[in-house]
Amino acid sequence: MGNSIRIGALVSGGGSNLQAIIDACGSGAVDGDVVFVAADTPGAGGLERARRHGIPTFVCEYRKIFETYREDPAGFKLPDDFDPDLAFSRQGLFNARGDRREIAAFLATRAAAESRLLEGMAGYPFDLLVLAGFMRKLSPYIIDRINTDPSLPRIMNIHPALLPAFPGTDGYGDTVRYGCKVGGCTVHFVDYGEDTGPIIGQRAFAIRPDDTLETVRARGLRLEWELYPACIQLFAENRLKVVEKSHPGPGGGVFIRKVVKIT
Ligand code: GRF
């Protein structure tokens, strides 16, 4: 790489981060092009933004797939290459001691949805997949089919909090509810857990006493629009490397973690 990269994007909502990425590609701040935008719902505003720029779009309606499963779990069609035990052993979204049937149902329905996404993506070869406000968790099924080279993860996400604080769906809300004096956003590679992957970049901002959730969200989003393209450009320049780091852990053990080295 180090040339122009092909970027695929997944969205669920308004797509302001997608817009920032499209604009950065247009201005040359990102050496790349968005080659497709896919959504989990036809109502995602990001689809319309993509269409305005002539970017191909498609939708994989997760909700309909879940309904089909609920109506007839036994007859639910799974992808031929889905291995439930492998998915269960790899996933990091649930405590493995949790309800095995519930976890299995989650992984099966995700694999079905993700295989449709992969089918759609097959028409648009890409170097990097960016989650730009995509409100569905990715399971090992799709992650393993995109990250075929373990040394080069190819899926990025932006999260509205300073990870590892406040993973989950409401980063700015949690930041405000906890009375934090600093908020921020994080871009990371996607791994098998929820917002747990190696951190690529972060931006932080002060929270003032008169701030509300709305002002915090607005300030955070403005930083997201700078941070995401900057991290994508590091990927385009081939400057991101995931390495394993070990440190002495608390209580005498060893703490080992994959981290991103920016070269
Ligand atoms: C952003 O706050 C992003 O961090 C989070 O979802 C929101 C998406 O906003 N994952 P938009 O759709 O990009 O405007």
Image (spheres, rainbow, N blue to C red):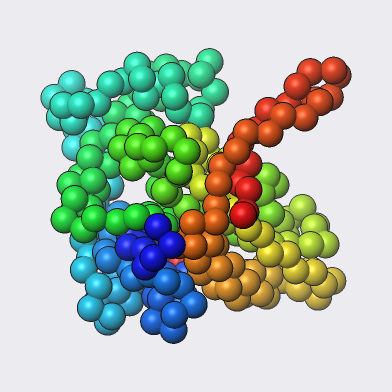
Point out residue 80 in the picture as x, y percentages from the top left corner: 16, 26
Above or below, comparing residue 85 to residue 115 in the picture: above
* The quadrant where residue 148 appears: top left
Q: How many marks?
A: 0
- Residue 94 in the image: state x and y as whole percent: 51, 27
The residue positioned 27% from the left and 66% from the top of the image is: 35
Q: Quadrant of residue 69?
A: top left
Q: Is residue 112 left or right of residue 224?
A: left
As rendered, which of 229 and 101 lies closer to the eye? 229
What residue lies at 27% left-to-right and 82% top-to-bottom?
52
Q: Residue at x 56, y 42 (%)?
A: 242
Residue 167 in view: no
Q: Is residue 182 above or below residue 21?
A: above
Q: Is residue 67 left or right of residue 31?
A: left
Picture residue at 60% right of the left edge, 38% below the top: 243
Q: Position of residue 10 (x, y in %)?
A: 35, 58
Residue 115: tell me if it is visible. Answer: yes
Residue 194 against residue 23 in the figure, above or below:
above
The part of the image, by quadrant, that contains residue 171 is bottom right
Question: x and y percent of residue 147 in the render?
Answer: 38, 40
Judge whether 97 appears above or below 140 on screen. Answer: above
Left or right of 79, for residue 255: right
The N terminus sits in image quarter:
bottom left
44 or 22: nearer the eye? 22
Quadrant assignment for the C terminus: bottom right
